Amino acid sequence: MKRIICLTTVLAVSFAASAQQFVIGGTKDDRTQAMQPGMTEYYYPKVPVVTPGDIKTNSAPSDAIVLFDGKDLSAWTGENGNEAKWKVNGDGTMTVNKESGGITTKESFGDCQLHLEWCVPVGIHGSGQAKGNSGIFIQGRYEVQVLDSYNNETYSNGQAASIYKQSAPLANPTRPEGEWNVYDIIYKAPTFKEDGTYRTKPQITVLFNGVLVQDNTIIVGTTEYVGLPQVAPHGDAPISLQSHGDPSEPISFRNIWIRKL
Amino acid sequence: MKRIICLTTVLAVSFAASAQQFVIGGTKDDRTQAMQPGMTEYYYPKVPVVTPGDIKTNSAPSDAIVLFDGKDLSAWTGENGNEAKWKVNGDGTMTVNKESGGITTKESFGDCQLHLEWCVPVGIHGSGQAKGNSGIFIQGRYEVQVLDSYNNETYSNGQAASIYKQSAPLANPTRPEGEWNVYDIIYKAPTFKEDGTYRTKPQITVLFNGVLVQDNTIIVGTTEYVGLPQVAPHGDAPISLQSHGDPSEPISFRNIWIRKL
Amino acid sequence: MKRIICLTTVLAVSFAASAQQFVIGGTKDDRTQAMQPGMTEYYYPKVPVVTPGDIKTNSAPSDAIVLFDGKDLSAWTGENGNEAKWKVNGDGTMTVNKESGGITTKESFGDCQLHLEWCVPVGIHGSGQAKGNSGIFIQGRYEVQVLDSYNNETYSNGQAASIYKQSAPLANPTRPEGEWNVYDIIYKAPTFKEDGTYRTKPQITVLFNGVLVQDNTIIVGTTEYVGLPQVAPHGDAPISLQSHGDPSEPISFRNIWIRKL
Amino acid sequence: MKRIICLTTVLAVSFAASAQQFVIGGTKDDRTQAMQPGMTEYYYPKVPVVTPGDIKTNSAPSDAIVLFDGKDLSAWTGENGNEAKWKVNGDGTMTVNKESGGITTKESFGDCQLHLEWCVPVGIHGSGQAKGNSGIFIQGRYEVQVLDSYNNETYSNGQAASIYKQSAPLANPTRPEGEWNVYDIIYKAPTFKEDGTYRTKPQITVLFNGVLVQDNTIIVGTTEYVGLPQVAPHGDAPISLQSHGDPSEPISFRNIWIRKL
């Protein structure tokens, strides 16, 4: 969770330069020059807006591990191994607690199919990255961006369903505040060589409200706010949901389940 | 459509040997020995049965080409370029006409996301491949199997959502007769070399009732009833729905839309 | 080694039908119909003949494991774990001993770069598959064919540098009898899922006398003489050189080294 | 050729910041912050040094297009479409002319196998990127680095056989000054979508003195000296050899041939 705190902190201190620099397919080294956040933000090609169809789900397949069915956070821990303190609302949903930090699954995962729904509150304030920002950190380090991208401009590779600062989504089918957005994610975990670099890179497909937005995208390393993707070996790892440091009203989640592949 | 007629004919004459033989990654040649249908049917690994969640859709994304919205068959032609004669039921669905043969889109497609729903009639008779058999022929030649696979044993690589006789589905989430099944297909078209072999092979991902059943599967050639996959160059091509020669009651389709990728 | 004996026996009894049948991406099952050898042999597209350049090597890179440098067979075992009994000629080469069966490395390998040279004796008799036939079994089960394919017709997917009965070479740069042929092979080992099927398939690139003949070819299973490729889980495994049962004069090898990747 | 001039100019003015910034998988945009050259240079993992074997070639396969056989530069043009003015030495080799800029093939290429040899002069001066620097620009925009990397430290992703500033080589088998180095390159050209982004990315395999150094590496965009890879659509394109602006003595080339795949 430390990393997530770090990210929000960096954001809070208005885009201060990080001491960490990472490069394409590499790992950090003191000789590599420091970067600024804006160096990995691009605005073109523009992501086409699509009005999604009315895809709806309420229940999980029988072989899925249900991570959140509306009742409790028993599948999750909070920061530093403490109890997860997001708010369970009693109507099948839960809401981010911006004071308590992110939450992380107790179980670790490799190849998987992940279903998750999220909703931005009616009347949310803010703009750009500071409006309904959250994220799903697959294996704790590859972020599928969550953001209110309905009529909200930001860099292409930072909007909802981007692989954060790596791969812009193919379309923007975000629903307006108060409506539920659906992510269906197919993820293939990386394998590593002895020197710590990828033997096979992670790959991800994302359907967003039923619209294909990541098409077997190859992930080239961690999804960094400042600097380039970093590569370091890891095995199966938990999934984290981000409590982002922006001042906008907290978003909610529901219907989270995962199938091991 | 000729090929589809041929397939059903072959089946009708009780698995007679075809004069055509195709081999792995190849094209037909007189010197290659003829095969029997049963040579490309395998039963192991067994496909695990999964009860799907309650995924539901009624409408298409705004950038989709609607191929069937319940009103008419204007996007389709029948056999030999004639009018499509499947039955439009007036309730948003259409039903296979086993007398008139398959139907084919007027438009051609390459890379695409295809959504389609199908339903086997209550009280359907038959078993194995002779129960609710149909198929979706992507680019007219790569079949995603449609079959009543609810409590109905057949070879693994021939059940619902198989890439017919090539790739068994990862799971069997077929819903029982009278309930609607949903296919969400992501397809990458092949490219060809000058000698007519694949430069890049076709690839396909299928979600079946929201469950991943084909995971970026590499298609190695046409999906033949008798013999091995065949490779021959083609460009964008229409999608066909099969009118299968088995004697079981005809199945129905609804909500068919496609997005060009 | 048992499998290799079996292959040569089957060939010796003039292409008798095997009781084993394997299917595309599958594993054997009694219900699948038996095949004949000629069903997986194809002749089209014809492989273009190329006269290679004069690529020559005598020594290995410093980080290679030398499997044969002309001096002895200490890196190899023979059939059934016995001593390797192929003939070391004293001039840097060794010759197949058709009485004693194949030889197998003592060490196991996964991802690797393999260099190997082979030569058909001057005055060799025979034709088709019965002329200078041998093979390199990567991980003991994926055969890169060795055959005198200089002015010697056979099925495309069975000539020199084919992935036997799966993938024909892109070109035929075989040198005539008495001259040394060079294979440079880049191999990526498969990974497996819990159900025993491939998670990632094996892939192979082959340069044959400096000419690209397999271009990151995806291997779909074992390279069977009779029937379709079979899939069964395995880890790192030795490399075998085949002693083939055809009556032609035995071929020779030299300069065999491998780099773990 | 304009781009190559630009690169050398930028280098000559001591690493001045470029006005162009590109991002991962993107195309340039004014809102993205400018980068410095050192931001895309990484030093870890360190590339292991390997002493290569004695691989040697003098002639091309019969189906190759010979781009340079020692006689003349008839297959090449110089800057701005002028005559290629590198020095043909009469001993089968040619030498870079640092005054006249790079040279470019008259013919365009897509998928190909490229063979090329290069040699740094005995007594060459300089260090790091300023010692024997040149480059092979596949399709005019994806650079396979040429550099005297024998006992010469530089960033990992900038040494000989790197995909410049993208992918470090797997090994460093560079031969010392006065000896010939051999590159065997297998290249798969990209395909593009309508929006100008990659449909399939370029891929490259490089054998360097017979040692695998790029293993089907996915290229993510152009190989920029300053900033991140850029993506813009292109078809078949010529190959360029770089005349680099560093003050070290010019290097030589020989035996350049290419096979269309």
Image (cartoon, coloured by chain):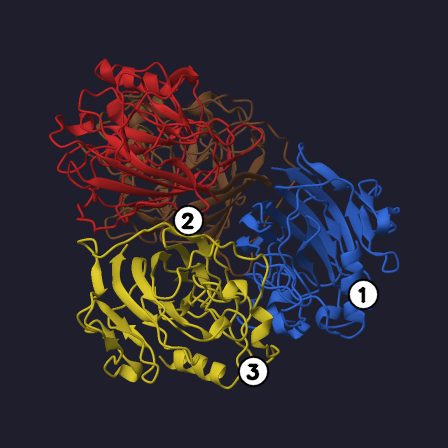
Chain colours: A blue, B brown, C red, D yellow
Residue D162's label in the rendered image is none
Q: To which quarter of the image does residue A242 belong?
A: bottom right
Residue depth check, mark 3 versus mark 1: number of the one nearer the observer: 3
Question: What's the amino acid at mark 2?
Answer: Leu
Residue C194 horizontal side relative to residue C248, left or right: right
| Residues tagged by mark 3 and mark 2 found on one chain of the structure | no
Question: What's the amino acid at mark 3?
Answer: Ala
- Which of A5/B139 is in front? A5
Q: Secondary structure at mark 3?
A: loop
Q: To which quarter of the image does residue B250 belong?
A: top left
The residue depicted at 65 percent of the width and 72 percent of the height is: A154
Q: Is residue C102 above or below residue D136?
A: above
Residue A245's label in the rendered image is 1
Q: Is residue C107 above or below residue C15?
A: below
Residue A47 pos. (x, y %): 56, 67
Q: Which residue is mark 2?
A: B73
Question: What's the amino acid at mark 1?
Answer: Gly
- Which of B87/A229 is in front? A229
Chain at tag 3: D
Residue depth check, mark 3 versus mark 2: number of the one nearer the observer: 3
Tell me the quarter of the image containing the N terminus of chain B: top left
